[in-house]
Image (spheres, rainbow, N blue to C red):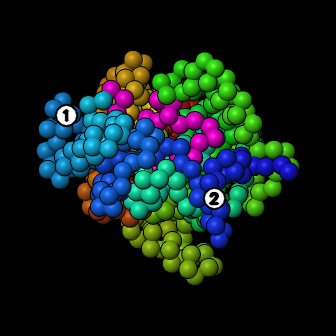
């Protein structure tokens, strides 16, 4: 019987099935400073970590993105400092590999594991953050879990899960000029909705994704959760293997050959059944921006803020009115008339080298007229960017070049918007207050963010690029 990529991974990981629930073997667990509750529960219940070598810890959510010269001791805010210290202590106590604040590999838990070869096709990966879906770009099943489940995973290396439904999003063709993977996933979410993937795991298929880099696939899978899906995935192929080969944790020699044999059998079989299918053409997608307070509330940058009076469904009209009110916009105004106070380029969605290259290609065309931050997703990304001279481009254009971490994506490290401030952001969530209480967020691609920094308003990046 033809099987999907998802079914093949489920089948390889089921330990036992009871009353419709599956006990699954978990290959990797990823934690960050916020996972202290999971460690506390472990100790309270007198448990130990079953396989410490399969658990990886990252300092990312709480680390400051400036003034890092003095390491942990240099973190001014005691509460934030303690979160970082707690993770260090828990990792040491339980024998878990830590990518700490002083580590040359430090970075976001969805950027470091692919860089290090920890993320591999066919694995089941659980992370203490919902954007763990990012890792599905390698053809593995990866999703976020809460503290109780993380404790269970650490104690047993297993997790109870209900079987999810499968959904295939097929995109064909080459994206147009100035259109990036971020625009593609924002367009998918705008089409299927923030609950379009609820109860499903999405496989992204078609020539658009086959021709996409691993960085782009990670951006797309990262935001699957914003469409309500438990996870997103792309079948592994030569692009995947080329990215992985030689990375520190990737298999070597005969083990690589054996792994390849398994990985090459993973892609969905011809004729396999999906519970839901969505088809789109890449050429129909334009650079996107969100105007509202969830990732579905967006559209092509050439469009207008919607007018709730034009929306027939009363509930949707009320949601749109509420979002427009919070965002302090006017119905019918052009998206390109929205002025911004700040720009953030970074996060696990768009903090990779390809993202910084795309942003720098625009930054070199002008000078930032509003504060603009560039926060690499990891130290290796930062070093690579510096080796390519991207930091110089950004600094010459008036952008701030900061240290790696989650930063303004979630605003819990002290980097945050002031009430009423408006930010063009490459992160993944534009919920009310996500970037700081009262802050307003517009999700965009890295190139669009750089364009907003130069123009001081949401801008169609194609105008800037065409002028060169
Ligand atoms: S960058 Fe944002 S979404 Fe990604 S791991 Fe950090 S807080 Fe979570």
Task: Answer above or below: position of 16 versus 172.
Answer: below
State left or right for residue 112 relative to residue 203: left
Residue 91 visible in the displayed image: yes
Residue 452 visible in the displayed image: no
Return the x and y of residue 71 as percentages of the image width and height. 19, 34
Task: Give the tally of numbered discs.
Answer: 2
Task: Answer above or below: position of 107 versus 319.
Answer: above
The circle drawn on residue 71 is 1
Q: Nearer the viewer, residue 78 or 340?
A: 78
Q: CA distance from mark 1 to mark 2?
A: 45 Å
Which of the two marks, 1 or 2, is nearer to us in this view? 2
User: For numbered disc 2, what is the local secondary structure?
Assistant: strand
Q: Nearer the viewer, residue 62 or 66?
A: 62
Is 29 magenta? The answer is: no
Task: Answer above or below: position of 130 versus 311.
Answer: above
- Image quarter of residue 440: bottom left
The magenta stretch spans which residues? 104-128
The circle drawn on residue 16 is 2
């Amino acid at each position: 019987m033809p099987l999907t990529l998802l079914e093949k991974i489920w089948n390889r990981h089921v330990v036992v099935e009871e009353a419709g629930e599956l006990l699954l073997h978990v290959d990797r667990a990823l934690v960050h400073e916020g996972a202290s509750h999971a460690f506390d529960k472990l100790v309270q219940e007198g448990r130990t970590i079953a396989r410490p070598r399969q658990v990886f810890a990252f300092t990312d959510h709480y680390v400051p993105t400036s003034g890092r010269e003095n390491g942990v001791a240099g973190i001014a805010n005691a509460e934030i400092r303690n979160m970082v210290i707690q993770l260090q202590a828990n990792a040491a106590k339980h024998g878990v590999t830590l990518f700490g604040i002083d580590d040359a590999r430090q970075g976001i838990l969805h950027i470091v594991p692919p860089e290090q070869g920890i993320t591999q096709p066919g694995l089941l990966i659980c992370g203490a953050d919902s954007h763990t879906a990012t890792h599905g770009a390698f053809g593995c099943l990866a999703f976020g879990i809460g503290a109780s489940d993380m404790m269970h995973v650490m104690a047993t290396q297993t997790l109870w899960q209900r079987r999810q439904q499968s959904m295939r999003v097929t995109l064909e063709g080459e994206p147009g000029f100035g259109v990036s993977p971020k625009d593609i996933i924002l367009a998918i979410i705008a089409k299927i909705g923030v609950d379009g993937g609820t109860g499903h795991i999405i496989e992204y298929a078609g020539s658009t994704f086959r021709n996409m880099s691993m960085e782009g696939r990670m951006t797309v899978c990262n935001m699957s959760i914003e469409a309500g899906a438990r996870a997103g995935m792309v079948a592994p192929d030569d692009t995947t293997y080329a990215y992985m080969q030689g990375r520190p944790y990737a298999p070597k020699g005969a083990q690589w050959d054996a792994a390849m044999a398994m990985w090459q059998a993973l892609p969905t079989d011809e004729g396999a059944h999906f519970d839901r299918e969505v088809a789109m053409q890449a050429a129909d997608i334009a650079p996107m921006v969100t105007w509202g307070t969830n990732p579905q509330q967006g559209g092509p940058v050439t469009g207008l803020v919607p007018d709730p009076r034009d929306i027939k469904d009363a509930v949707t009209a009320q949601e749109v009115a509420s979002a427009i009110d919070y965002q302090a916009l006017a119905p019918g105004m052009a998206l390109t008339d929205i002025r911004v106070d700040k720009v953030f380029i970074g996060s696990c969605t768009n903090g990779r080298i390809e993202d910084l290259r795309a942003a720098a290609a625009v930054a070199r065309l002008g000078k930032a007229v509003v504060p603009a931050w560039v926060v690499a997703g990891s130290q290796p990304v930062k070093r690579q960017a510096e080796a390519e001279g991207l930091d110089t481009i950004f600094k010459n254009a008036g952008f701030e070049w900061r240290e790696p971490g989650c930063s303004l994506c979630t605003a819990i490290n002290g980097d945050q918007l002031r009430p009423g401030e408006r930010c063009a952001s490459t992160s993944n969530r534009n919920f009310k207050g996500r970037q700081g209480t009262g802050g307003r967020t517009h999700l965009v691609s890295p190139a669009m963010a750089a364009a907003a920094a130069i123009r001081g308003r949401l801008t169609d990046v194609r105008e800037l690029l065409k002028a060169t």
